[in-house]
Amino acid sequence: MLRPRSLIIYFLVLLADILLIALDKESYRYATKPLLVVLLAVYVLYTDVKIPRSFRLFLLLALFFSSMGDDLLLFDHLFLPGLGSFLMAHIMYITFFLKIRYSNLPVPYCKYPFIFLNAAVVIVFILFLAPYLGSLTVPVIVYALALSITVQSVLHAFHFRRQPAGWFCIAGAVLFLISDSLIAVGKFYHPLPGGDILVMLTYGLAQWGLVYGSTAYFRKRTTSFKPEIGNL
């Protein structure tokens, strides 16, 4: 029962958090923002999908470090530790999707145009933002590269034509990239109108897409393997 309810509650809490931003009630977000990723972790823990233990561990670690990052970024003076927590979250996501990649058959069609596009976008963004980063130049560039590698790892992980769950994951990875890019532009270059709302909306959908797509992939994989197991 916790599995479907946790996702329903997740979107209700996300909506509440966005409304608090819109109403300029930032102090109340201490009760909403930290709860979001915890609800996704509950979903992963109690899902009826049989996710192999090592895969589940890295997915939960990605959510754990994301939760730490959410908590730390509620305080402006903890931006750098928050950035470090999200860097760890991306390393866990990268490991998780690489494990899927190497447990999946090689992809039979070329994704290089998308891979090069992702790399080009990140490089151009870094070059644009670099003059405004000051003492945070190195941490932000390292984090931007980790974001790019997360997208690349998802691109490599799935056969998108016959594993549609991968589309949720790639949408989540791209939305994560967009969300953090909005944060960077607002913090280092110029605040954007409605930027905080867009950041939270894209971030909330990003985390959901990564988690939902991952569990949907393992549900489909388990189902497709059942006939083979029955024939042994």
Image (cartoon, grey):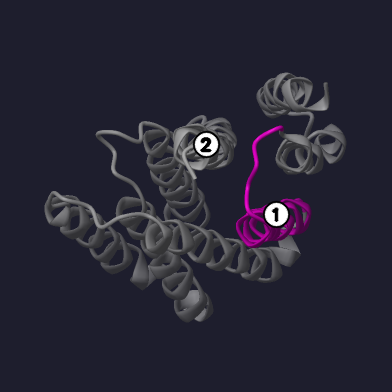
Pick whichever, 170 or 75, lies toward us: 170
Residue 65 highlighted magenta (yes or no): yes
Q: Position of residue 143 (x, y in %)?
A: 48, 68
- Left of 189 or right of it: where is 12? right
Q: Position of residue 193 (x, y in %)?
A: 48, 32
Residue 229 highlighted magenta (yes or no): no
Disc with the residue nearer the chain's start (2 vs 1): 1
Asked if 187 appears above or below 175 in the picture, the reply is: below
- Amino acid type, callout 1: Leu
Q: Position of residue 209 (x, y in %)?
A: 51, 35
- Amino acid type, callout 2: Gly
- Left of 88 or right of it: where is 73? right
Which of the 4 quarters of the picture holds residue 46? top right
Q: Which mark is residue 60?
A: 1
Q: Position of residue 79 (x, y in %)?
A: 67, 64
Sort mark 1 into few (<14), some (14-19) or many (20+) by Cα contacts within 10 Å.
Answer: many
Which of the 4 quarters of the picture holds residue 78? bottom right
Pick whichever, 92 or 136, lies toward us: 92
User: Under tag 1, what secondary structure?
Assistant: helix
Residue under label 2:
230
Q: Characterize the magenta stretch by its predominant secondary structure.
A: helix
Asked if 150 appears above or below 32 in the picture, the reply is: below
Pick whichever, 48 or 42, lies toward us: 48
Q: Nearer the viewer, mark 2 or mark 1?
A: 2
Which of the 4 quarters of the picture holds residue 75? bottom right
Pick whichever, 139 or 85, lies toward us: 85
Magenta-drawn segment: 48-74
Residue shown at the point (85%, 32%) measured from the top left: 28
